[in-house]
Amino acid sequence: MNGTLNKVILIGHLGDEVKMHYFEGGNCIGRFPLATNDVYINKTTGEKINSTEWHNVVVRNKAAEICEKYLSKGDKIYVEGRIKSRQWQAEDGSTKYTTEIQVTEFTFLTTKKDPEGIKNTPETPKSTNFDNPIENDLPF
């Protein structure tokens, strides 16, 4: 081991539909916001506080296609991946920054497209591990 680790584990709800982007050569990526919640009691006031954190999630190729097919806004999912920060030039010339979770494995926990839950069949995988190398030459 090289002494460092970049690993993220999240369980949350999709904040929107999976947005797909296709590239020449057949590759694709899917993006969706994932909400995680933290609930705690303010010790001073006794008030229940609900705090939501939003994560930008990226899935690639076959994983993206599976997520687009089976996931909808509000569905609950378990994801594992790596944190990746990137920057790009906007049309107005300004530099934009983002931090994303690049998924290597996921499990559907609830889906609206199949109210009984996803069956673990070849057509509808429940848990998938994608150990493909992460591409760093995205055009956006």
Image: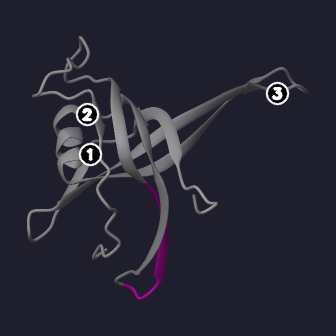
Q: Is residue 83 left or right of residue 134?
A: right
| Residue 104: mark in rendering | none
Disc number lying in front (2 or 3): 2
In this orientation, which residue lies closer to the viewer: 83 or 4?
4
Q: Is residue 52 left or right of residue 59?
A: right
Secondary structure mostly taken by the magenta-highlighted segment of the chain: strand
Q: Which mark is residue 71?
A: 2
**Scheme by which the image is coloured:** one colour
Locate residue 125: give its quadrant: top left
Residue with the mark numbered 1: 18
Q: Given contact means CB atoms under 8 Å apart, are the residues at marks 2 and 1 in contact? A: yes
Relative height, residue 113 to residue 104 (above, below): above
Q: Is residue 11 magenta?
A: no
Kindly report the distance in space between the C-alpha atoms of the residues bearing marks 2 and 1: 7 Å
Name of the residue lying farthest toward the top:
116
Quadrant of the rendering where the C terminus is positioned: bottom left
